[in-house]
Image: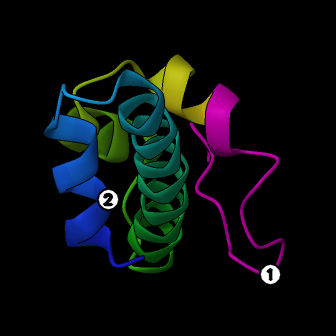
């Protein structure tokens, strides 16, 4: 199923079971896309704080969520460096 079809199913309230499954699929997709963008941002030299600002969360939140998930070959900026 295409992302747009999943979004339509998530917005359709006539079948809650299908809608909830679609919401779960969108959450998984959004999480994967967020990780890709975080990795791209770090590769581009953005700090954890800049990534957090762009996502509208705290630096600690974005670091906790992604620091162990990112590609280990990405040079990660350090606060005290």
- The front one of 42 and 68 is 68
The x and y percentages for residue 75 are: 68, 72
The x and y percentages for residue 37 are: 40, 67
Residue at 35% across / 34% down in the picture?
19
Q: Which residues are magenta?
A: 64-81
Q: Quadrant of the N terminus?
A: bottom left
Mark 2, residue position: 6
Q: Is residue 53 above or below residue 72?
A: above
Badge 2 marks a residue whose secondary structure is helix
Magenta stretch contains residue 80: yes
Q: Is residue 44 above or below residue 55?
A: below
- The front one of 53 and 26 is 26
- The front one of 49 and 10 is 10
Residue at 41% across / 71% down in the picture?
45
What is the chief secondary structure element of the magenta stretch? loop
Mark 1, residue position: 73
Residue 10 lies left or right of residue 38; in this view the side is left
Residue at 68% across / 27% down in the picture?
64
Residue 78 lies left or right of residue 72; in this view the side is left
CA distance separating discs 1 and 2: 33 Å
Q: Quadrant of residue 55?
A: top left
Q: Quadrant of residue 49?
A: top left
Residue at 64% across / 33% down in the picture?
65
Instruction: Describe the colour scheme in one phrase.
Output: rainbow
């Amino acid at each position: 199923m295409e992302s747009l079809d999943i979004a339509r199913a998530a917005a359709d309230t006539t079948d809650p079971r299908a809608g909830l499954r679609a919401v779960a699929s969108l959450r998984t997709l959004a999480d994967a896309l967020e990780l890709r963008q975080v990795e791209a941002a770090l590769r581009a030299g953005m700090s954890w704080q800049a990534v957090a600002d762009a996502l509208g969360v705290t630096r600690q939140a974005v670091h906790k969520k992604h620091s162990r998930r990112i590609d280990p070959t990405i040079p990660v900026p350090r606060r005290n460096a």
